[in-house]
Amino acid sequence: MIFKSDVENYLNMTKKSGSVGLMKMIIYFFHPRLTPIGIFRLSSFFYRMNIQILAQILSYINQILFGLEISPKVKIGPGFFMPHCRATVIGAKEIGDNVTIYQNVTIGAKYLDFDYNSSTRPTIGNNVIIGTGATVLGGVKIGEGARIGPHALVMTDIEPNTKFVLTQNSNSSSLCDLAQTKPEILNFKDICDARGALVAIEAIKDIPFEIKRIYYIFNTKTAVRRGFHAHRNLKQVAIAIHGSCKFLIDSGAEQSHYELNSPVQGLLIEGLLWREMYEFTDDCVLLVLANQYFDENDYIRNYDEFKKMCGSKV
């Protein structure tokens, strides 16, 4: 029974171990975070068995008890999870495996569609997370591993493994990265005495991620510019441990410049940001700490592609 996979996914996320047998499935059917999903699974089962009246009754029970309106016609893969489901409407064509949907989400046709035309309804890939208050409308495809942020409005396809979504307001629309923030200068504690100075950097404590990769750049000529790329998911902290250099950071909407000239300061760069380094001093040694191993697929090396991902005109 597919509900077993929903229970297993929930137990895995809550770090609870143990096999899932029939008795545990019955117990978790009455768990407040799983009961709405269990009711939907029953409704979907009766719909596929062509027992429409029972399918509709169970759908109404979900609406009345949990404020969840979800069509029994929706195909939803195993491992489905809804931490909270109030005011959520789901009328997708298909939802993949291990998808998490938060409360107050709407997924359905862009216009009235009483015939439930699948071509007018969204297709959600595997391992997608849809944040609180998000709206996904029309026959769009949300790629595997995508993250849709709170209160986002999505009416175009989203590429796999991206953390940005289409948002709209009364004046404009643009693609934005959920993780995108402006670069931040981090100040590290230095320990100084008669012998000299020491800086210690600890993962999570001094920088906001685990360190999986370290590299450094040196012997770069002053006239040389480096970088010319963005990252989809990578987080980095750059430190000029000797000499100095400058960074140009481009968000797709605005550009900013930063100078690194102290071994007790680092530049935190995360999200969909184009970066270039320039004006290296002859003695510059630029150390970079990263939260992921090297992955060429994480790079965006074409500026026009980057601007398109940001929703900006090129």
Image: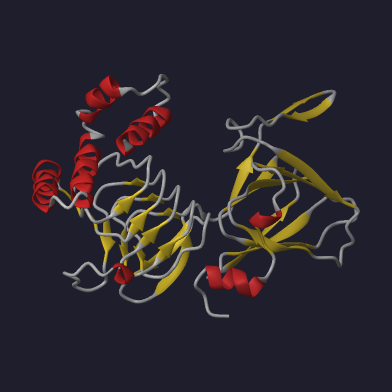
Residue ID at (34%, 42%): 80
Residue ID at (44%, 67%): 157
Taking depth in this image into account, of 134 and 168 the one nearest to the observer is: 134
Task: Locate residue 110, reporting x and y percent.
Answer: 26, 71
Q: Does 170 sit left or right of 201 as displayed?
A: left
Q: Does 186 sit left or right of 67 as displayed?
A: right
Task: Locate residue 116, reporting x and y percent.
Answer: 22, 67
Q: Does 259 sit left or right of 60 as displayed?
A: right
Q: Is residue 138 visible?
A: no
Indicate the quadrant containing the N terminus: top left, top right, bottom left or bottom right. top left
**Number of marks in the rendered image:** 0
Indicate the quadrant containing the C terminus: top left, top right, bottom left or bottom right. bottom right
Residue ID at (10%, 46%): 54
Task: Locate residue 290, reporting x and y percent.
Answer: 68, 43
Q: Does 209 sit left or right of 288 as displayed?
A: left
Task: Please determine whether, in this image, residue 56 is positioned above or below residue 27.
Answer: below
Task: Locate residue 146, reporting x and y percent.
Answer: 47, 54
- Asked which quadrant contains residue 65, the reply is top left
Task: Please determine whether, in this image, residue 162 is positioned above or below residue 285.
Answer: below
What colour scheme has been applied to the protein in the rendered image?
Answer: secondary structure
Taking depth in this image into account, of 184 and 233 the one nearest to the observer is: 233
Residue ID at (38%, 30%): 8
Q: Is residue 237 visible?
A: yes
Residue farthest to the front?
49
